[in-house]
Amino acid sequence: MKKKILVISGGISKERAISLDSGKQVAKELSRNGYIVKICEPNLKLIKIIKSFKPNTIFNALHGQFGEDGYIQTILETTNVPYTHSGVLASSIAMDKAISKKIFIKNNILTPKFLIYSFNKKKIDLIKLIKQKLKFPVVVKPINEGSSVNVYICTEKNIIRNLKLLNEYKKIIIEEFIPGREIQAAIIGSKKLGAIELKPKRKFYDYKAKYSSKAKTKHIIPVELSKNNFNKIMNLALKTHKLIGCKGVTRSDFKFFKGKFYLLEINTQPGMTSLSLVPEIASYYGISFIKLIELILKDASTKK
């Protein structure tokens, strides 16, 4: 008898549309392969649905705030039903770019220099601080968003204007802009899945470059790296996965510049849409979409 899988998708984050698509693709593939599947939103009816449906496993297809920051994981822990991807602590650490970058630095993982900016500081002080600690251009982004939501590359001339677009956040992260190649590496369980290089037509690999086919971002796989450098990036991705305490699948985002890999962040719940990178990487290495989903389900557990 095939297992019952509850797929949670949607939510209230800015990545809701991507989550709905991920959940839809996962549910469709599971149903096609004989699983008993139900899709639901993470609303007030969630616990009631879990109790009535009695799933063997919960597939967490949420993205962004509430879905991959430890919040929904805390709720799922109370059900004692195994759920996919990382647990409470790993999710909250990975989602907080400031905390995760401090962990990278402490463990000798190269990451762009950064500073935290609170909106109660004077703008003129910020420009002075950036010139002292970093240098323009810089990357400005929320501390706890995913999918490159509200990420801007800023110069001294436009940073004040772009900051106004981010004043819904109490704090943001400002980091040095690293030019070079965009390479992302995926881990599943405790195994190295593979890597992919991205060449966006836009300024960088932002939200539109990730999720719009019109953006025409070029995906390069296999990545053109020496064997030594390929092993290096995969080892860094695995080290980060284990260091944060992740489960299931993760995708680590790197910049490769002047022979060095800079880790930008680790994503604990990569997309599962037709344009998503982890399914594409898996497919190249002979892992079908259903096999990928089953590998993620296999690593599901109740974990804090």
Image (tube, rainbow, N blue to C red):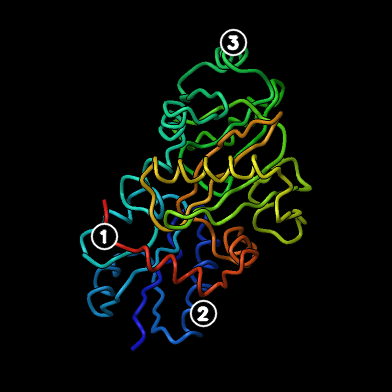
Query: Do the numbered discs 3 and 2 sit on residues whose CB atoms are within 8 Å?
Result: no
Spot occupied by residue 285 in the image (x, y as percentages of width and height): 62, 64
Spot occupied by residue 124 in the image (x, y as percentages of width and height): 59, 13
Q: Dot 1: within a 10 Å radius of its alpha carbon, few (fewer than 14), some, or many (20 or more) residues? A: some
Disc with the residue nearer the chain's start (2 vs 1)? 2
Q: Where's the N terminus, which quadrant?
A: bottom left
CA gap between label 2 and label 1 equals: 25 Å
Picture layout, residue 3 above or below residue 108: below
Spot occupied by residue 30 in the image (x, y as percentages of width and height): 47, 79
Label 2 element class: helix
Nearer mark to the viewer, of 1 and 3: 1
Q: Nearer the viewer, residue 228 or 241?
A: 228
Q: Dot 2: within a 10 Å radius of its alpha carbon, few (fewer than 14), some, or many (20 or more) residues? A: few
Residue 302 marker: 1
Name the residue type under label 2: Lys
Picture layout, residue 93 above or below residue 88: above
Label 1 element class: loop
Disc with the residue nearer the chain's start (1 vs 3)? 3
Q: Residue at label 2?
A: 28
Image quadrant assignment for residue 136: top right
Q: Dot 3: within a 10 Å radius of its alpha carbon, few (fewer than 14), some, or many (20 or more) residues? A: few
Image quadrant assignment for residue 61: bottom left
Q: Residue at label 3?
A: 132
CA gap between label 1 and label 3 equals: 45 Å
